[in-house]
Amino acid sequence: MPPDQAGRTQILQVHARNVKLDADADLEAISRVTPGMTGAELANLVNEAALLAVKRAHAAVSQRDLLDALEKVQLGTARNVVMPDEERRRTAYHESGHALLGMLEAGADPVRKISIIPRGRRALGVTHSTPDTDRYGYDETYLRGRIVGALGGMAAERLVFGVVTSGAESDLQTSTHLARMMVGRSGMSERIGPVQVLPEEGDPRAMGVSEGMLDVLAEETRRLVDQCYERAL
Ligand code: ZN
């Protein structure tokens, strides 16, 4: 389980020991905006901030260096490519779809940053949201909201451009995975009931789940995703 806020402050302090911090660097503030980050990610964050400070010829690591490093760690490194206007326009609508639904859906995590700068290996844009506080459990409304938000990019593209592009691939992976978990592991389908029909990993048949039940699992997953997509539209 990822560390809580006090834990994150301690981890940041430990890793910042080998780094010269500027007077304005506020590790406590960084720990407040990083719920869900692991110890390794926090260590990486301090390293990235130190590298940035060197690049910028700062004598010490400033709060700005830490915040810019956080953006890089959370969103991925910006790729140095020029996107055609049409592609950027599409990406802007796609990310806006995620962001709007992220703000409108009850209980969704607040949207922190939207970018249409290509990052990482594949992403054309990114909408980043993180919870306000550490979360330990998720109710059905929240999880449905997550699926609706994940489908928001695809819904926006369909409404504005009338087509669906391969840019929604990782969103579909997210929404399908969430829906399968809700239905097959968390007892959130009335038809399947409060039983687990999906193992943590591996083939459900190995734990005695019948082909008939797998069909129901697929149908229920599809039904949930369909409902969420309708809502997103
Ligand atoms: Zn997307």
Image (spheres, rainbow, N blue to C red):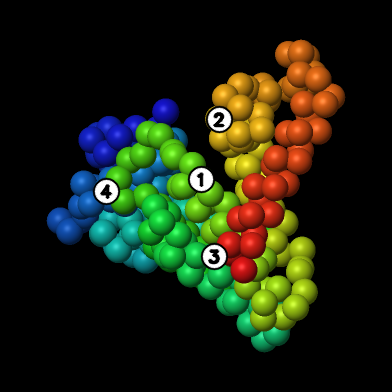
Q: Nearer the viewer, mark 3 or mark 4?
A: 3
User: Where residue 154 appears, x then y in whole percent?
Assistant: 67, 66
**Residue 169 in view:** yes
Mark 4 residue type: Arg
Horizontal side of 166 relative to 100 (left or right) equals right
Give the Cα separation between the discs numbered 2 and 3. Answer: 25 Å
Q: Which residue is mark 4?
A: 32
For the C terminus, the quadrant is bottom right
Percent x, y for residue 33?
A: 31, 51
Verify CB contact (< 8 Å) between mark 4 and mark 1.
no
Q: Mark 3 = which residue?
A: 98
Q: Which residue is mark 1?
A: 143
Tag 2: amino acid: Ser
Q: Within 10 angstroms of label 4, few (less than 14), some, or many (20 or more) residues?
A: some
Q: Residue at x 65, y 47 (%)?
A: 224
Going by the picture, which residue comes out furthest to the bottom? 85
Is label 2 in contact with label 1 (beta carbons under 8 Å)?
yes
Q: Residue furthest front?
A: 191
Say left or right for 184 vs 202: left
Residue depicted at 66% across the width and 37% down the height: 180
- Helix, strand or loop at label 1? It is helix
Which comes before the other along the chain, label 2 or label 3? 3
Are circles 4 and 2 on residues that touch, CB within 8 Å? no
Asked if the beta carbon under badge 3 is closer than 8 A to the nearest atom of ligand 1, the reply is yes
* Mark toward the start of the polypeptide (4 vs 2): 4
Q: Secondary structure at mark 4?
A: helix
